[in-house]
Image (tube, rainbow, N blue to C red):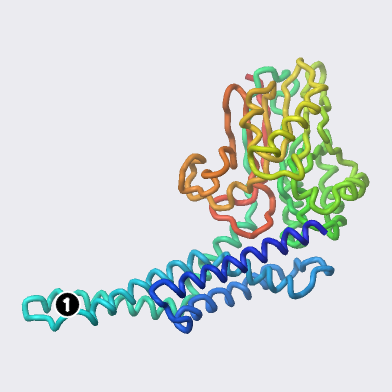
Amino acid sequence: MYGKLVLLKLSFYILVSESLFLGILWKINKIKLKTLLPYVLIICIKLFLVLGFVFYDAKFPPDIPLVFDLGLMWSLGFLFSLPLLLVYLTIFLIQTKRVHKTKTNTIPSDNNQELISRKALFHKGTSLLTTSLKYSPILGTTGFVSGMLLGSREIVVENIPIGLKNLGREFHGYKIMQLSDIHIGPSLPAQQMLFCIDRIKNHKADLLVVTGDILDFSLLYIQDVVHFFKAIKPYFSDGIYCVLGNHDFFDDHKVFLNHMQQTGITFLRNQTITIQKGSSIINLLGMDYAWPYHGIYGERMKLAQKLFAQTQNNIVSDGPNILLNHDPADFIWLQKKSIDLVLSGHTHGGHIKLSSSNKSIVNPVSWVYPYYSGYYEEKGSKLYVNRGLSHTLPIRVGAPPEITILELRKV
């Protein structure tokens, strides 16, 4: 299966990176392996066990070998532990440098005894901190991991008013619920799925739209997907409309779509439909992810523009145009088209968002993606990027899972 190969490649690359990283550290300052390895192993083993408990009720598909399960878990453990490992090693190198300088100094005179005493005090303090970190890392590590894992389970409901100039009066106050990146599979255990369903049922909306990545990797979870949509479909009077994200193509998207027919929901595959109330209409457009390409520019963008050309053929000029498109990077050029509102997902809010400002450089994803979380407006066109309901990797800091309720308003 394609999804299995993606995970296997990810595991392999991280394991190779781990080996290279340790090799470099071994060479720098001639650090002895017996000194370095305890720092790595004590964190990785503990995080390996933590992840085992996290995924205890979300086993990988049975066709994936046990050795792959273990390899992936170890890779994830190393990935999560890398920030802490850097802290450990920084303190270790500071301590080593201090010891080296102390040994090469001449015997101090009476005039600089006070200075040496201060250095000795700092050295002892550093040694104490290093020893504490080496033998008692549980507090810092547990806090770090808990923040990431618990942040990936919380669901925030965002109520967003959207003003549209050409909105008919019958649609004033109309509510659209947006879900994205549900990733039904190992990342969404049964209990968490039931929690998601309850949250959706408890918030009323007229229409539900899903902007891609419904499935995670494997069609082995297709019955869970069917159950999910059958459970929520009765709560939306105007139906459920979806588009395909990149993950939905991983494991034979045609088989996926055939199974989804039994749910009664509609997939907009480079199509436009009209929603009408009285004399007012909304044009709802939906386009596929530009599979099999990735990235922002290049071949992926060229194919996305071709797909949009197919999608806009049935646009009616009498109402606002709302486009469902998985990748928000396309807003770079979609803002120049006759689209009033674009709804996207894909980025999971960047996973780690340390500043409320989307343009802040302390948010790592802002270095790559110009649009990745929340509301944007440029050249009269609007974009909302949903942070996703689940994830592929359980890392979320300042970017919790999201259910969006968009209330349309005539302006």
The residue that disc 1 covers is 116
Residue 135: image x %, image y %?
Answer: 45, 82
Residue 75: image x %, image y %?
Answer: 63, 68
Q: Which residue is drawn at 40% across and 77% down?
A: 30
Examine the image and state in which quarter residue 403 appears.
top right
Q: Which residue is drawn at 82% across and 52% down?
A: 228
Examine the image and state in which quarter residue 16 appears.
bottom right
Vertical order, 281 against 387 (above or below): above
Q: Which residue lies furthest to the left in this view?
A: 111
How many labels, in total?
1
Q: Nearer the viewer, residue 282 or 198?
A: 282
Q: Which residue is drawn at 66% across and 34% down?
A: 330
Vertical order, 207 against 105 (above or below): above
- From the image, which quarter does the N terminus lie in? bottom right
Examine the image and state in which quarter residue 306 appears.
top right
- From the image, which quarter does the C terminus lie in? top right
Q: Nearer the viewer, residue 137 or 401?
A: 137
- As shown in the figure, which amino acid type bears the numbered disc 1? Ile
Q: Which residue is drawn at 66% across and 25% down?
A: 409
Direction from residue 134 to residue 77 in the image, left or right: right
Residue 304, can we see it? Answer: yes
Vertical order, 71 against 315 (above or below): below
Residue 366: image x %, image y %?
Answer: 53, 43
**How packed is label 1: few (under 14 Cα within 10 Å), some, or many (20 or more)?**
some
Direction from residue 311 to residue 136 in the image, left or right: left
Residue 191, can we see it? Answer: no
Residue 201: image x %, image y %?
Answer: 76, 47
SS at circle 1: helix
